[in-house]
Amino acid sequence: REIKVTIDLPVDAFLPQEYIEEEVLRIEAYRMIERTRTLEEVESALTELQDRFGTPPEPARNLLEIAKIRVRMKDVGIAELSVKQRRIHLAKVFPQRFDLAKIKRVYPRSIFKANLLELVVPLSREKEVLAEVFALLDAIMNSELLPEEEVVQKRDCRMSVPKSFRFFQRAGC
């Protein structure tokens, strides 16, 4: 079953009329981007846009970067992403899908709110929002998935937690 993702980022992401003048072609391009399911398909869409319409302006490049973020979110099973007050909020995050301890080492100021299934990571000042969001999702993707025997099922709880995070159980899950 494919996960439905929601993305709310403070960037302009669209295909400007000046870039693709004909509305029918612009709608076709939006559909092509929406149909992408892999990073390679997003790159292929970028190549096609460049071949047909020239170098994409920043809002179009942002749209393609968001398509990559959408693909990566589906890869790691994260349903919601937003950036608020210089913080990345990933919601409906299931810690048994990746090694949360490794993420905590890479992003020491990150906070996992177990009761909300939300991971909050402060943005750094050096990187652009899209690059930082993708880097975080990449880190999650590349963190080692926990073996099934490392996951403890808590009774009366809808989520399972890794042994290394038993404090979730004390927190009432």
Image: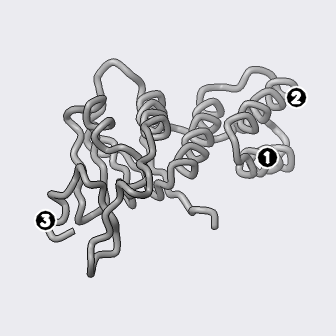
Q: Please say if 59 is above or below 4.
A: above
Q: Which residue is mark 1?
A: 32
> x and y percent of residue 7 in the render?
49, 51
Residue at 83% across, 27% down:
53
Report the residue marked by disc 3. Answer: 171
The foreground one among 89 and 92 is 92
Residue at image point 19% right, 35% down: 109
3 or 2: mark nearer the eye: 3
Q: Which label sits on residue 52?
A: 2
Q: Position of residue 3 (x, y in %)?
A: 57, 62
Residue 52, percent across and down? 87, 28
Residue 166 horizontal/vertical position (percent)? 19, 58
User: Is disc 3 in contact with disc 2, using a CB cutoff of under 8 Å?
Assistant: no
Q: What's the residue at 56%, 43% (across, down)?
A: 72
Q: How far, Cα to Cα, is label 3 from label 2?
A: 55 Å
- What amino acid type is highlighted by mark number 2? Arg
- Left or right of 144: which side holds 18? right
Q: Amino acid at mark 1?
A: Met
The colouring scheme, among rainbow, by chain, secondary structure or one colour, is: one colour
Residue 82 appears left or right of 173? right
Check disc 2: other Cα within 10 Å, few if <14, some if 14-19, many if 20+.
Answer: few
**Which SS class for mark 3?**
loop
Q: Quadrant of the N terminus?
A: bottom right
Comes first in the chain, label 3 or label 2: 2
Task: Locate residue 59: give its quadrant.
Answer: top right
Examine the rendered structure and indicate whether residue 127 appears above or below residue 70. above
Which element is circle 1 on? helix
Q: Which class describes the residues within 10 Å of circle 1: few (<14), some (14-19), or many (20+)?
A: some
Mark 1 and mark 3: Cα distance apart in space: 45 Å
Q: Give the alpha-carbon distance from disc 2 to disc 1, as whole Å.
A: 13 Å
User: Which amino acid type is marked by label 3?
Assistant: Ala
